[in-house]
Amino acid sequence: MRQGLRRVRDEGEARNLLAQQRLSGLSLRDWCNVEGIKAHSLAWWKIRLQDSAIRLVEVTPMTPPAAHPEARYIVHVGDLAIEVSDDFKEDTLGRLLDVLSRC
């Protein structure tokens, strides 16, 4: 291991560095070597952040308002809530939930 490589200090820094690494197209190890970061330190954060991204999703049917008689649902992802109608597109909701899981 090269001398002088630095550790990732906190979650905020880890999220920022992981985003930069993904955009670079380089492997985590190669990107860390270029940037002077200990690869095992950033890899540890990557695993930790992936584990913390696993959340339960709760879908609650709601009573439709009289003006809008179609069925509606509220999808809870952590502290966020998304309201969808009964005719939602599954792939669109899937993409939305994927984005929210990275927040």
Image: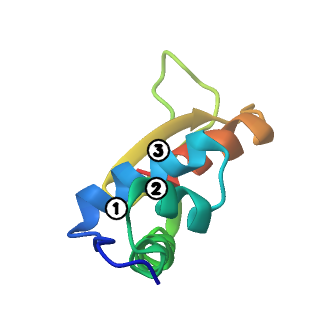
Q: Nearer the viewer, residue 80 or 23?
A: 23
Q: CA distance from mark 3 to mark 2?
A: 5 Å
Left or right: where does residue 87 sit relative to residue 103? right
| Coloring applied to the structure | rainbow
Do residues under tags 3 and 2 come within 8 Å of each other at their CB atoms? yes
Using the rendered image of the protein, determine whether residue 75 is visible from the camera's viewpoint: no
Do residues under tags 3 and 1 come within 8 Å of each other at their CB atoms? no
User: Which residue is label 1 attached to?
Assistant: 14
- Name the quadrant containing residue 88: top right
Q: Position of residue 19 (x, y in %)?
A: 47, 47
Left or right: where does residue 85 sit relative to residue 80? right
Residue kind at label 2, given as amino acid type: Leu
Q: Nearer the viewer, residue 47 or 34?
A: 34
User: Which residue is label 2 attached to?
Assistant: 18
Residue drawn at (78%, 39%) of the image: 91
Q: Residue furthest left?
A: 9
Tag 3 secondary structure: helix
Residue kind at label 1, given as amino acid type: Ala
Q: Nearer the viewer, residue 18 or 85?
A: 18
User: Which residue is label 3 attached to?
Assistant: 20
Q: Nearer the viewer, residue 92 or 54?
A: 54
Q: Position of residue 11 (x, y in %)?
A: 27, 65
Left or right: where does residue 5 sit relative to residue 47? left
Tag 1 secondary structure: helix
Q: Residue furthest top?
A: 67
Residue kind at label 3, given as amino acid type: Gln
